[in-house]
Amino acid sequence: QVQLVESGGGLVQPGGSLRLSCAASGFTFSLYAMRWYRQVPGKERELVATITSTGGSTDYADFVKGRFTISRDIVKSTVYLQMNSLKPEDTGVYYCNAASRRTGLEYWGQGTQVTVSS
């Protein structure tokens, strides 16, 4: 059974930090690129950050560059999103995504709420 379980969300003040985790199971984690998306009510889900299957390359949306860092631990089958200098506009539900270009398979987590507010 494939599972992506996010954790680490919560309420934080502007300028603060949070670290999201996404624990993967039920598939070969090392063969999948991993991504973090976020969504706010009334808006489309948007891509935040990507890390390749090997972890050798990362990419970020312009609105988080320099503030967020994506990483992965192959041994723990977990991907992380370190979020620093958080802004109110970073508020949303953050989703973990696993995708294999080779097989076309894609999986989603259930999401974790991040709220940035004073």
Image: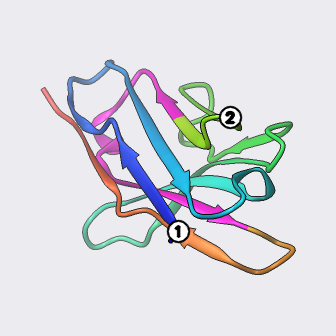
Name the residue located 29 percent from the left edge and 39 percent from the top edge.
Answer: 9
As for residue 111 lying within the magenta part, the answer is no
Q: Nearer the viewer, residue 7 or 37?
A: 7
Compare marks 1 and 2 and give the one earlier in the sequence. 1
Residue 4 % position (x, y): 47, 58
Quarter of the picture containing the C terminus is: top left
Looking at the image, the residue that sits furthest to the left is 118
Segment colored magenta: 81-99
As for residue 93 lying within the magenta part, the answer is yes
Residue 59 % position (x, y): 73, 44
Name the residue located 56 percent from the left edge and 71 percent from the top edge.
Answer: 107
The total of numbered circles placed on residues is 2
- Which residue matches tag 1? 2
Q: Nearer the viewer, residue 35 or 27?
A: 27
Q: Quadrant of residue 57?
A: top right
From the viewer's perspective, is 5 left or right of 10?
right
Secondary structure of the residue carrying tag 2 is: loop
Neighbour tally class for label 2: few under 14, some 14-19, many 20 plus, Cα within 10 Å: few
Amino acid type assigned to the residue bearing label 2 in the image = Val
Residue 31 % position (x, y): 80, 57
User: Does 90 appear above or below 102?
Assistant: above
Secondary structure of the residue carrying tag 1 is: loop
Are discs 1 and 2 less than 8 Å apart at CB?
A: no
Q: How far apart are the alpha carbons under marks 1 and 2?
A: 17 Å
User: Does 25 appear above or below 18?
Assistant: below
Disc ID at residue 56: none
Residue 61 % position (x, y): 62, 47
Name the residue located 66 percent from the left edge and 53 percent from the top edge.
Answer: 34
Name the residue located 41 percent from the left edge and 21 percent from the top edge.
Answer: 85
Neighbour tally class for label 1: few under 14, some 14-19, many 20 plus, Cα within 10 Å: few
Amino acid type assigned to the residue bearing label 1 in the image = Val
- Which residue matches tag 2? 75
